[in-house]
Image (cartoon, rainbow, N blue to C red):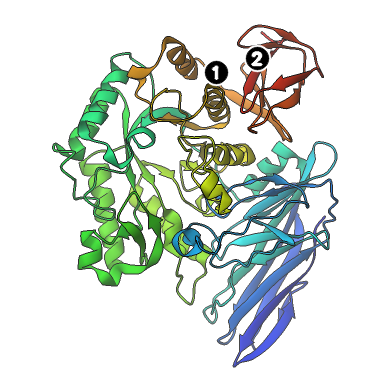
């Protein structure tokens, strides 16, 4: 377990050269400072480059002595919020995006800058390996400020290498550039993640777990002022103790024109924030601060602000564009927007979306990771002490900066979007895709930020989810999430749906003990003195799960013995309570 050797390859004057990162080194072109030492219960490896003359980095790699077997479980953290993230084995292949879809949606992931290979697997910022027993070996980057760190598994050679996303970078002469700052620990899973975030000096989030309502997953861009007020009244009249009431996309004239409110909101956004506060809730507003669509005033009046194409959204005017974060006028505009939203309209939280777009076209002297980290620090600065919910974000850059962060794709109004799945689109809107990442990234909750697993849906109208699928989504989100929202109009709830919804407010502090994902998912957790377990089948076929302890089913109070095998319907979840706990 550890680093064997590293290598930096660079060009100078058209000639390519390589230097070892095994130890400190100095030449007329550059100096390398490298070290490996015990740190925070694990090992820390650092390699710092200081150029003495102009050069261009072509590759930067570290080789580990990590041995892998066919039984090894490897965690792959996807590029950004929406990218699927899960434990796999060496038999797994990362799906390649259909070439016909790439011009429209390739910008959402790493399809445009990382070369995908069927013989390799890759993970961003951190990864871990599970062999036998309860211990994991975790490899993590302690900072992405100098570039994204990728952990690449070679399926043929059964080995792990570490890459820095810095090819083509021309670092500034005389300025130190951190090639790698890596942390390695072998420990029980929870202890390994505690060590990892302690090594980063990331403080635990100051915010508390919260519940709320958002307009998006019922009203989408058609949301109106009356929709917001109707739903607000439905919560306040019942005195339901949610924390946030958030207005999503659909209030603005065009994406990018955040201070121009459309005629569906005749009394403006400050009025709605006041109404939300009067009802006893905190007010949230959605923004996509670093993009604009072609129909926006921003795009027409400021073509020099536009950096590149950032994606395609059929719910807007089609193609949309990234703004140049390093343009002083763009920064000034964003400061004005945030000051208006947070201080004049008096919203308490901003949900910041499509953040990946900031680094689609980095300057020659910066990497994608540098741009993203600097952009997130800027967002933190202009938000002051107000709350940030991040989305569409490379997660490693958000550690310790965002209060809440989405850690999954958007849920869909159905279980799976078969058309998008067939395209091998890892960031697709899909309920099962969202649940997969919610399970895979649960270790970030309460360490990097509080996790947003996206909404649950209990209502009958405007969705195609079965009752089993709704219950599975509700239970996994409410147990593993730090921010648990819905978009349901609760006036439509049946008595049974309302009863289930209200369990959110009766739940004691949740402590997740372990998650095992195989044919079915087993989530063991405590609520106060109660020992509980979720057995979930995410498949559309029936499956069998093993009962982990002598239990009573929550719904029927039926006794199940330890190691008993039970059948789960497609997409069904069963909640068990230990028969020995209160």
Find the distance from the CA under tag 1 to the CA under tag 2: 9 Å
Mark 1 vs 2, N-terminal side: 1
The quadrant holding residue 299 is bottom left
Q: Which residue is mark 1?
A: 508
The quadrant holding residue 176 is bottom right
SS category of the residue bearing label 2: strand
SS category of the residue bearing label 1: loop
For residue 477, side relative to residue 570 (left or right): left
Seen in the picture, residue 146 relative to 169 is either above or below; the reply is: above
Q: Which residue is mark 2?
A: 530
Seen in the picture, residue 506 relative to 221 is either above or below; the reply is: above
For the N terminus, the quadrant is bottom right
Query: Residue at image x 84%, y 49%?
Result: 70
Residue 31 in the image: state x and y as whole percent: 66, 80
Of residues 319 and 184, the one drawn nearer to the viewer in this rendering: 319
- The answer to whether mark 1 and mark 2 are in CB contact below 8 A is yes
């Amino acid at each position: 377990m550890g680093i064997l050797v590293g290598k930096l390859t660079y060009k100078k004057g058209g000639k390519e050269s390589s230097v070892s990162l095994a130890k400190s080194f100095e030449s007329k072109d550059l100096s390398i400072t490298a070290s490996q030492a015990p740190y925070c219960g694990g090992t820390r490896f650092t390699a710092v480059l200081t150029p003495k003359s102009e050069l261009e980095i072509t590759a930067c790699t570290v080789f580990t002595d990590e041995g892998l077997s066919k039984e090894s479980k490897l965690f792959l953290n996807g590029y950004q919020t929406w990218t699927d993230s899960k434990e796999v084995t060496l038999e797994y292949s990362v799906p390649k995006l259909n070439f016909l879809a790439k011009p429209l949606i390739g910008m959402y992931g790493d399809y445009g800058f990382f070369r995908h290979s069927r013989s390799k697997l890759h993970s961003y910022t951190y990864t871990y390996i599970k062999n036998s027993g309860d211990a994991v070996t975790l490899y993590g980057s302690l900072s992405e400020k100098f570039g994204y760190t990728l952990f690449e598994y070679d399926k043929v050679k059964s080995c792990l290498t570490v890459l820095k996303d810095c090819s083509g970078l021309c670092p500034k002469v005389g300025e130190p550039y951190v090639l790698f700052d890596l942390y390695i620990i072998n420990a029980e899973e929870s202890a390994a993640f505690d060590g990892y975030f302690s090594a980063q000096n990331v403080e635990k989030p100051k915010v508390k777990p919260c519940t709320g309502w958002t307009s998006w997953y019922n009203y989408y861009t058609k949301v109106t002022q009356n929709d917001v007020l109707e739903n607000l009244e439905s919560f306040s009249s019942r005195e339901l103790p949610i924390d946030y009431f958030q207005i999503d996309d659909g209030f603005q004239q065009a994406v990018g024109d955040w201070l121009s409110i459309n005629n569906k909101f005749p009394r403006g956004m400050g009025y709605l924030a006041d109404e939300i506060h009067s009802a006893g809730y905190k007010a949230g507003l959605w923004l996509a601060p670093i993009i604009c669509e072609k129909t926006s005033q921003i795009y027409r009046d400021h073509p020099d602000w536009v950096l590149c194409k950032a994606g395609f959204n059929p719910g807007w005017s089609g193609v949309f564009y990234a703004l140049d974060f390093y343009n002083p006028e763009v920064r000034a505009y964003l400061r004005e927007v945030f000051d208006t939203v947070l201080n004049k309209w008096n919203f308490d939280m901003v949900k910041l979306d499509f953040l990946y777009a900031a680094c689609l076209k980095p300057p020659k002297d910066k990497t994608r990771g540098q741009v993203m980290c600097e952009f997130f620090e800027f967002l933190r600065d202009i938000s002051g002490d107000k709350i940030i919910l991040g989305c569409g974000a490379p997660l490693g850059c958000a550690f310790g900066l965002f209060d809440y962060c989405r850690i999954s794709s958007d849920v869909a109004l159905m279980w799976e979007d078969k058309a998008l799945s067939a395209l091998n689109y890892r960031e697709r809107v899909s309920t099962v895709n969202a649940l997969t990442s919610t399970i895979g990234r649960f270790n970030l909750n309460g360490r990097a930020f509080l996790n947003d697993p996206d909404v649950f849906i209990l209502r009958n109208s405007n969705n195609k989810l079965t009752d089993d699928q709704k219950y599975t989504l509700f239970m996994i989100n409410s147990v593993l999430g730090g921010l648990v929202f819905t978009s349901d109009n609760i006036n439509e709830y049946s008595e049974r749906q309302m009863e289930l919804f209200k369990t959110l407010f009766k739940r004691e502090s949740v402590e997740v003990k372990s998650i095992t994902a195989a044919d079915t998912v087993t989530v063991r957790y405590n609520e106060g003195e109660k020992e509980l377990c979720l057995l979930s089948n995410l498949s559309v076929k029936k499956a069998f799960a093993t009962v982990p302890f002598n239990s009573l089913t929550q719904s029927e109070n039926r006794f199940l013995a330890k190691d008993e095998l039970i059948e789960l319907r497609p997409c069904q979840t069963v909640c068990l309570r230990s028969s020995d706990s209160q």
